[in-house]
Image (cartoon, rainbow, N blue to C red):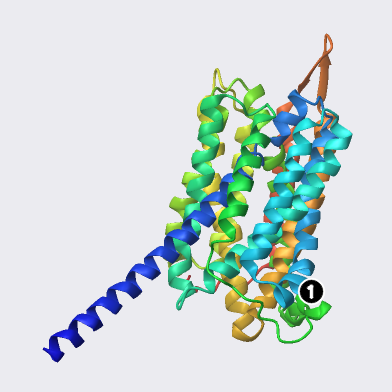
Amino acid sequence: MDFFIAKFGKFYYLNLNILMKLTVRVQLMLMMFLMFSTWGAWYGQMGKYLFTTLHASGDQIGMAYATFSIASIVAPFFMGMIADRFFAAQKVMGVLNLIGAGILFFLIQNQDADTFFWYILAYTLTFAPNLALSNSIAMNQMQHPEKEFPAIRVVGTIAWIVITNIIGLLDVGDKVTIFQISMVASLLWALFAFTLPNTPPKAKSSTSLAGILGTDAFVLFKNRSFSIFFICSILVCIPLSFYYAHGNLSLTESHMKNVENKMSLGQVSEVVFMLLIPFALSKFGIKKMLIVGLVAWIIRFVCFGYGDGISSEWMLYLAIVLHGVCYDFFFVTGQIYTDNKAGEKIKNSAQGLITLATYGIGMGIGSVLSGKVLDIYTIQKEGVATHDWTGVWMVPAFISAAVLLIFMIIFKDDSKVEA
């Protein structure tokens, strides 16, 4: 009898443990879903909303997108100096998103494009730290993050696809509704965050400025190929900013219907090409992968510039679905390249350094430049502003071509690594 009780007890606790792990897994997936729903509701549509509803100039649109770069630079300092040292990650996430929902409430009431900048800056400062917080919360619950994390993270991409399709079906991409949806999602996310598994602060000692900036990884600049890759990564973020800031508005003015729904094909493409990375890396090597990514950027911008929703909509579809090749084959492959070059000791510093440089500096420059370029190619016809999109998109196309030329000539590392 004791034997059967012991066996039953072991079986019971084993299944209880499996159930608990499943519960945590569902929690982490829901966290990702809420985070990317909150973000996806407004990010790709903000440029069209600013131009159509607030009658913003290109410069004002560019500056609004630059706030995310400012927040991306500030976020590591917030995480390193405060969040990692004193507070549980899930509580910081909850508080940040309660504040974020409050800021969005006031942003929704705003009708002035200049004032909008300060509201969206305040909001992005509350949002940006969540990208690191969510990774910290998720990986703290995993024994093998490299195997378990992708299945959690992909839910975020699914959420982006779902929310943009909802916005497309409601036909509210140019309305304040995008921020109303984001506000509700942020509030739900904030309340849910307090129920997430506890992730206590881990920093035992004060975090140095050098650690946050990733200066430990400066040793990698002794390698010429890595230095070229680093510079090209910053430069290619400039054309990337054009896509995020103007893609939606461009497609709308090019007579494409249901733009948000069709743009979500870019995220579907991202998932597909993400799955191809391990095979492509082992088959073709780093240099060819990065070159394919850069060539895809050029083709994409040419298609945006010359495509039309009436006579050549296939070009616009091609521009959208190339998002997966552009993003995965350059940025994700680049992260893998950085990881392999850095090694175990400094890989966190190396990733932090390249993230700060690309999403902070590169996209910041690109956002501001994209706004100024849009103003240059804005045409007034009978009091109505339209745009010469061929002129706009040729700027990032030429920048991408220049980066490709530099990269092909100087970058020499063609190692084949495992993803």
Instruction: Judge by depth and name the residue closer to the eye, 30 or 116.
Output: 30
Residue 225 visible, this angle = no
Give the residue drawn at x 83%, y 8%: 382
Residue at the top extreme of this rendering: 382
Tell me if residue 32 comes above or below residue 86 in the rendering.
above
Give the residue drawn at x 69%, y 51%: 98
Residue 278 visible, this angle = yes
Image quarter where the N terminus lies is bottom left
Examine the image and state in which quarter residue 293 appears.
Answer: bottom right
Give the residue drawn at x 59%, y 71%: 337
Tag 1: amino acid: Met
How packed mark 1 is, by other alpha carbons closer than 10 Å (few <14, some 14-19, many 20 or more), is some
The spot of residue 97 in percent (x, y) is 68, 53
- Left or right: where 133 falls relative to 165: right
Residue at the front extreme of this rendering: 1
Question: What residue is disc 1 on?
Answer: 81
Instruction: Judge by depth and name the residue closer to the eye, 156 or 231.
Output: 156
Tell me if residue 51 comes above or below residue 345 in the rendering.
above
The spot of residue 330 in percent (x, y) is 59, 58
Give the residue drawn at x 78%, y 67%: 78
Tell me if residue 47 comes above or below residue 197 in the rendering.
above
